Amino acid sequence: MSYCLNPAVQPQITQLRVSCSVRPVAQPLLRDRYRSIQTLAKGGFGATFLAEDMALPGRPACVIKQLRPAASAPQILQMARELFVREATILGQIGNHPQIPRLLDYFELNREFSLCKSTSTV
């Protein structure tokens, strides 16, 4: 089963399909790559999902952490973007650490910032 990654709508679930609108569509992919399997946590600033990487053989699991800034003011969005890039940069520099999941990907879509991390540590 997939989970709707769009926080603005309530997903409509039918057999083998999840839709973020009224009309059912094929299972949505985030960044044309990640299929959400399960919501792990939701809060005021974002959400965390367990996902499958559909672009890799075996569809390995990963964790996607989304930051969803509530304010749309340009200076707030820019500050969120800078903090997001800083976190991604630090995670990338750490590389493999026994207690920190490895950064696999990071991206910005529709004013939402996402980090994709491994599901396990080294």
Image (cartoon, rainbow, N blue to C red):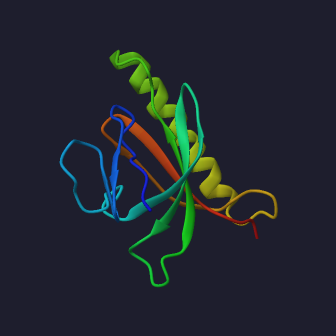
- Of the 4 image quadrants, the one containing the C terminus is bottom right
Q: Position of residue 43 (x, y in %)?
A: 58, 30
Q: How many marks?
A: 0
Q: Position of residue 111 (x, y in %)?
A: 34, 34
Q: Is residue 73 above or below residue 80?
A: above
Q: Which residue ends up furthest to the front in the rendered image?
A: 15
Q: Nearer the viewer, residue 115 or 36?
A: 36
Q: Nearer the viewer, residue 90 or 98?
A: 98
Q: Nearer the viewer, residue 7 or 100?
A: 7
Q: Which residue ends up furthest to the left in the rendered image?
A: 23
| Residue at (64, 56) in percent of width and height | 93
Toward which corner of the image does residue 100 lie, by quadrant? Answer: bottom right
Q: In this image, 73 relative to 85: left or right?
A: left
Q: Is residue 122 above or below residue 7?
A: below
Q: In this image, 27 relative to 67: left or right?
A: left
Q: In this image, 58 relative to 41: left or right?
A: left
Q: Is residue 8 above or below residue 38?
A: above
Q: Nearer the viewer, residue 12 or 84?
A: 12
Q: Position of residue 2 (x, y in %)?
A: 42, 58
Q: Position of residue 46 (x, y in %)?
A: 52, 34
Q: Which residue ends up furthest to the bottom in the rendered image?
A: 57
| Residue at (44, 62) in percent of width and height | 1
| Residue at (43, 52) in percent of width and height | 3
| Residue at (30, 38) in percent of width and height | 110
